[in-house]
Image (tube, rainbow, N blue to C red):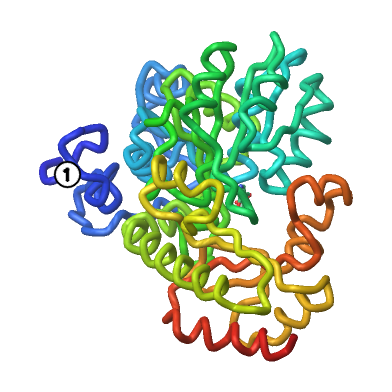
Amino acid sequence: MAREIDGASKDFHTDTLAVRAGQRRGPEGEHAEPIYLTSSYVFDSAADAAARFSGEQEGNVYSRYTNPTVRVFEERIAALEGAPAAVATSSGMAAILSTCMALLQAGDHVVCSRSVFGSTTVLFNKFIAKFGVDTSFVSPVDLDQWREAIRTNTALLFLESPSNPLCEVADITALSQLAREQGALLVVDNCFCTPALQRPLGLGADIVVHSATKYLDGQGRCVGGAVVGAEEHMQEVLGFLRSAGPTMSAFNAWVFLKGLETLRLRMLAHSANALELANWLQSRPEVEQVFYAGLEEHPGYQLACAQQSAFGGVLSFRVKGAREQAWRFIDGTRFLSLTANLGDAKTTIVHPATTTHGRLSDAERAASGVTQNLIRIAAGLEHVDDLKADLEHGFAAL
Ligand SMILES: *Cc1c(COP(=O)(O)O)cnc(C)c1O
């Protein structure tokens, strides 16, 4: 239909793609994208049904396979990441699981950053391992560790950058080189930056996975995910999803579409608030250390400047003292949301050692730097002066 844009076109800036890519208007001329809340689709004739089922004729059959609202979301996130294709999933973890199930086989080996989302570690260690795929964990910032961990059967490298909660920055370009030399795929969880701030495929990564639950939605409403990459890989992932079922619902896809329209504006605002809080926290005598890649002292600063356009919304800091001081600080704040979620308009605060990283062994926790006096903040979109005022209550409670 006229007056729609081609998401694969290089003629548009990402801000425009975020608002318009993927939309195809129906005969009603609706302005916003419609929600197709239907589990299945009807055919004009028995012959049409046969053609649709055999794949001879393109079109929808069943919403576990395809759904028009979900398709718009897939085309839009692919356009934003600069990828040929994307597949939407029921959660971020379903995106990671589907990638593994589609692209790994028994006897393969994975090298994974040790600073990844807790459930990702559990997925590799406890479940993917059951199918004969071993995973080695390495420091995301130590290229020698990655190089040494790679074996002849390494099929996949997996990382998050910046990491949670210490904002370690992995060198995506260098790691994509290592992956290519080995003939392995580099998979990047781009949840913390989103394509508004970082486009890993442009740096050489093969596949990007997302938890749409976080910044793509941005307002804490829905759980969802996406896998983004080359057509051949996405066909494999789609094949797994269609058979196994962790696909995205049409309603959630619509919520994420609305989220994407404001993605860049929100990411810049989250980043500005986080940077100001990081600088402010650093000036406080009660604080031992602040972790945020936007601080010049942070070891990942130069790399973050090179591969990101802003530093994102998540920062963490160690208060002087132990767990008692960290808990007192958190309990002292009055309106910050005490929750492990992030990527929300509402600022969140959490004690990683006893929540998000509570299931790790003491050794694993120590290796990832998650000490008992560490507090993580995911800066939201409130006025930064009000955030500082609430954090002052935390300091007063120490
Ligand atoms: C939350 C999160 C996930 C998992 O996403 P869900 O949507 O909760 O399944 C994966 N990676 C990162 C970095 C996350 O923050």
Q: Is residue 132 above or below residue 30?
A: above
Q: Quadrant of residue 390?
A: bottom right
Q: Which quarter of the rendered picture does the C terminus lie within?
A: bottom right
Q: Nearer the viewer, residue 212 or 144?
A: 144
**Residue 44 location in percent, x, y?**
34, 32
Q: Is residue 39 left or right of residue 257?
A: right
Q: Nearer the viewer, residue 294 or 341?
A: 294
**Residue 121 location in percent, x, y?**
75, 40
| Any part of residue 348 in sight | yes
Query: Residue at coordinates 65% horizontally, 28% vertically from top-left?
Result: 100
Judge: label 1 CB < 8 Å from ligand 1. no
Q: Is residue 169 above or below residue 324?
A: above
Query: Residue at coordinates 45% horizontally, 55% vertically from top-left?
Result: 311
Q: Which quarter of the rendered picture does the N terminus lie within?
A: top left
Query: Residue at coordinates 71% horizontally, 13% vertically from top-left?
Result: 151
User: Of all residues shown, which one is farthest toward the left?
Assistant: 2
**Residue 255 location in percent, x, y?**
43, 59
Q: Is residue 361 above or below residue 292?
A: above
Query: Residue at coordinates 69% horizontally, 18% vertically from top-left?
Result: 150
**Residue 235 location in percent, x, y?**
48, 22
| Any part of residue 74 in sight | no
Q: Nearer the viewer, residue 86 or 193?
A: 193
Decide: few, some or many residues near mark 1? Use Cα within 10 Å; few <14, some 14-19, many ≥20: few
Q: Nearer the viewer, residue 48 or 179?
A: 179
Residue type for callout 1: Glu
Total marks shown come to: 1
Where does label 1 land, which residue? 4
Helix, strand or loop status at disc 1: loop
Q: Is residue 353 above or below residue 239?
A: below
